[in-house]
Every structure is written in structure tokens, then in C-alpha cells.
Image: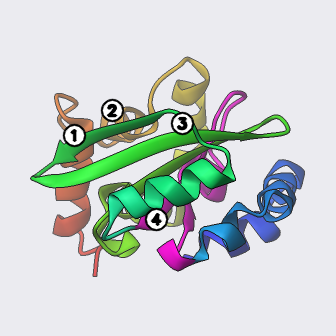
């Protein structure tokens, strides 16, 4: 799956997101961090109010924060997942909310990217799954929780459940 291509060839909302991301300049300004669009927009399961997730690889999170500050970010949050720091910030461009997420890991190894890959494969395998996911998303369900409910997976930690399921199905390489 190529998330940028999914936006370029998607519906009118997805194409608009692609144009705005390009016009914002963030992809060029943050190019050294290998930004990858992720989340519900490339998958076509967005709802009104969905933000665009932009994953990046940053070995030096302070350097990343400096670049993001120059782009216009102001509020940064840092947490850890399995002893790997994750730093987030949000940028606004026109009406587009871009959640920028950096880790000192290649994007393909980041959990959010892996979720997207698993969800993409699931949506490709089952054409009726998209409408069922969208029905739950419109009711306010988070994406991973919706998938877990529909796949009868443990919802206690839907993020881990979905990763476990994807590994078991050999969706991740």
C-alpha cells in the first residue's frame, strides 16, 4: 500500500487532503524525517473531524521538534511505547489538522503504520468490512476498536490485539 497514492487516486476528500498536504509544504520541510501519511484517510475510513496522521522517523527527537517548531508546531507531547519514545504535535493548515508523530524507528516499524497495513489488508480481503467499520466509526468508535469488535478480537487493548492478529495472518513483513 502506498498511502500517498491512495490519497491521489481516492475520492474527492482524499484528493483534497493530498493537495492540502502538498500545498502546506510540510512534506518537503520535513523530508529528512521520511514523512509517511497514515491513518483513516489513506484507508478511506475517515469521518468528519478526522485528522491526518503523518509518521516520521527521527533519531534525534529534539532536532525533529526544532524543525516542527519552525514549520509552525507549538505544543509537543512525549510518551513511551515499549521503551521507545514517541513525540507528537499538531499542525493546522487551513482546515486540515495534521497530527505529526515521530519515533526513532523506521516508519514501517512504527505501530501506527503497522495498524494501517493490517487494516488495509483486511479491507482488501472483505469488501463488506468497510461499511461495517464506517458504521461504528460514525458512532464515535476508534478505528482499531471497531476492527477488533468486527473481528471478535479482544478489545481490552485493541492496538495490541490488532497487531497480534496481523502477525498471525502474516500481514506484516
Residue at the spot of label 2: 149
- What residue is rendered at 60% in x and 68% in y? 30
- Eye-nearest disc, 2 or 4: 4
Image quarter for residue 153?
Answer: top left
Residue 110: % across, % down? 32, 63
Do labels 3 and 2 touch, CB within 8 Å? no
Between 99 and 3, the one nearer to me in the picture = 99
Q: Residues within 10 Å of mark 1 (few under 14, many from 20)?
A: some
The stretch of residues the image draws in magenta is: 32-57
Q: Looking at the image, is 54 positioned above or below residue 144?
A: below
Q: Residues within 10 Å of mark 2 (few under 14, many from 20)?
A: some
Q: Residues within 10 Å of mark 4 (few under 14, many from 20)?
A: many
Between 137 and 28, the one nearer to me in the picture = 28
Is label 2 in a helix, a strand or a loop? helix
Is label 1 in a helix, a strand or a loop? loop
Quadrant where the C terminus lies?
Answer: bottom left
Mark 4 or mark 2, which is nearer the start of the sequence?
4
Quadrant where the N terminus lies?
Answer: bottom right
- For the residues labelled 3 and 1, the Cα–Cα distance comes to 15 Å
- For the residues labelled 1 and 4, the Cα–Cα distance comes to 29 Å
Residue at the spot of label 1: 153
- For the residues labelled 1 and 2, the Cα–Cα distance comes to 6 Å
Residue at the spot of label 3: 132
Amino acid at each position: 500500500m502506498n498511502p500517498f497514492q491512495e490519497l491521489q487516486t481516492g475520492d474527492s476528500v482524499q484528493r483534497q487532503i493530498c493537495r492540502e498536504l502538498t500545498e502546506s509544504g510540510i512534506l518537503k520541510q520535513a523530508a529528512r524525517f521520511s514523512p509517511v501519511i497514515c491513518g483513516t484517510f489513506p484507508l478511506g475510513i475517515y469521518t468528519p473531524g478526522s485528522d491526518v496522521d503523518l509518521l516520521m522517523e527521527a533519531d534525534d527527537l529534539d532536532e525533529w521538534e526544532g524543525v516542527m517548531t519552525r514549520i509552525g508546531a507549538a505544543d509537543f507531547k512525549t510518551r513511551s511505547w515499549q521503551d521507545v519514545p514517541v513525540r507528537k504535535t499538531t499542525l493546522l493548515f487551513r482546515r486540515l489538522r495534521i497530527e505529526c508523530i515521530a519515533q526513532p524507528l523506521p516508519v514501517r516499524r512504527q505501530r501506527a503504520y503497522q495498524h494501517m497495513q493490517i487494516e488495509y489488508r483486511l479491507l482488501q480481503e472483505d469488501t463488506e468490512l468497510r461499511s461495517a467499520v464506517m458504521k461504528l466509526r460514525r458512532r464515535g468508535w476508534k478505528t482499531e476498536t471497531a476492527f477488533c469488535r468486527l473481528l471478535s478480537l479482544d478489545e481490552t487493548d485493541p492496538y495490541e490485539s490488532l497487531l497480534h492478529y496481523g502477525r498471525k495472518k502474516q500481514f506484516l513483513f
